[in-house]
């Protein structure tokens, strides 16, 4: 809060008379605070001014009322965020729906079948290579396909396990 001070002096003739009586400069008067500058804490339009210049004001009295539109909008936004967070919490407490679990099971079944097929193809390619009928490149390609199918199957299994485990306490 910034304060301005004004000096209220005795009439000029009395001050001059006192100053002449002594060689030292004398300032006569009283120091009064009659004006305060209020610094707004919020950048809002003023809706109502409750005190006019010259009015006596008690400590803690309401001086100015700010327009509530922006604060009302902020409160409504916060209320919507609370509603959204409550809905998300309820969803996390219920756990995953049956549909995503069924999808994860189907992905795991497909990945397991692909892995089994890749295993058989890698085994045949290795047998053909050992017999001298197929190239090393074919066996390497089938081994790489087997490795990818294994990774896909393991990823699908992990995704299903995550859904079945439910919500972690940190998420709640």
Image (cartoon, helix red, strand yellow):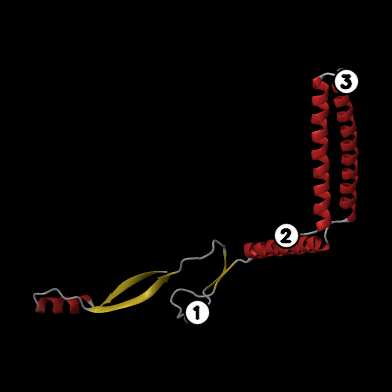
Relative to the observer, which residue lies in front, 7 or 15?
7
Relative to the observer, which residue lies in front, 140 or 37?
140
Q: Secondary structure at mark 3?
A: loop
Residue at horizontal 39%, vertical 72%? 35
**Of callouts 2 and 1, which one flags the residue occurring earlier in the amino acid sequence?**
1
Q: Secondary structure at mark 1?
A: loop
Relative to the observer, which residue lies in front, 60 or 100?
100
How crowded pointer 1 is (Cα within 10 Å; few <14, some 14-19, many 20+) is rated as: few
How crowded pointer 2 is (Cα within 10 Å; few <14, some 14-19, many 20+) is rated as: few
Q: Are marks 1 and 3 in contact (CB under 8 Å)?
A: no
Quadrant in the rendering for residue 7: bottom left
Quadrant in the rendering for residue 107: top right
Relative to the observer, which residue lies in front, 138 or 24?
138
Q: Are marks 2 and 1 in contact (CB under 8 Å)?
A: no
> Quick check: 114 left or right of 59?
right
User: Horizontal and vertical percent for residue 22?
Assistant: 9, 78
User: Horizontal and vertical percent for residue 2?
Assistant: 40, 68
- The N terminus appears in which quarter of the rendering? bottom left
The residue carrying mark 3 is 131
The residue carrying mark 2 is 171
Q: Is residue 71 above or below residue 10?
A: above
Residue at horizontal 48%, vertical 74%? 52
Q: Is residue 36 above or below residue 119?
A: below
What whole-number distance in Å separates the C-alpha atoms at marks 1 and 3? 99 Å
- Find the residue positioned furthest to the front: 131
Query: Which of the numbered marks, if any, corresponds to residue 60?
Result: 1
What whole-number distance in Å separates the C-alpha atoms at marks 2 and 3? 56 Å
Count every numbered label the image shows and give the total. Answer: 3
């Amino acid at each position: 809060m910034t304060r301005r001070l004004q000096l209220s002096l005795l009439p000029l003739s009395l001050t001059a008379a006192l100053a002449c009586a002594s060689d030292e400069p004398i300032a006569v008067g009283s120091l009064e605070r009659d004006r305060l500058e209020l610094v707004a804490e919020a950048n809002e339009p003023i809706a109502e001014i409750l005190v006019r210049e010259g009015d006596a004001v008690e400590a803690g009295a309401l001086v100015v009322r700010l327009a509530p539109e922006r604060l009302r909008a902020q409160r409504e936004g916060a209320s919507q965020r609370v509603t959204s967070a409550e809905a998300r919490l309820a969803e996390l407490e219920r756990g995953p729906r049956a549909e995503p679990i069924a999808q994860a099971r189907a992905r795991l079944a497909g990945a397991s079948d692909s892995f089994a097929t890749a295993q058989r193809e890698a085994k045949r390619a290795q047998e053909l290579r050992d017999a001298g009928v197929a190239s090393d490149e074919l066996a390497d390609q089938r081994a790489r396909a087997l490795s990818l199918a294994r990774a896909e199957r393991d990823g699908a299994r992990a995704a299903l396990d995550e859904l079945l485990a439910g919500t972690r306490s940190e998420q709640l």
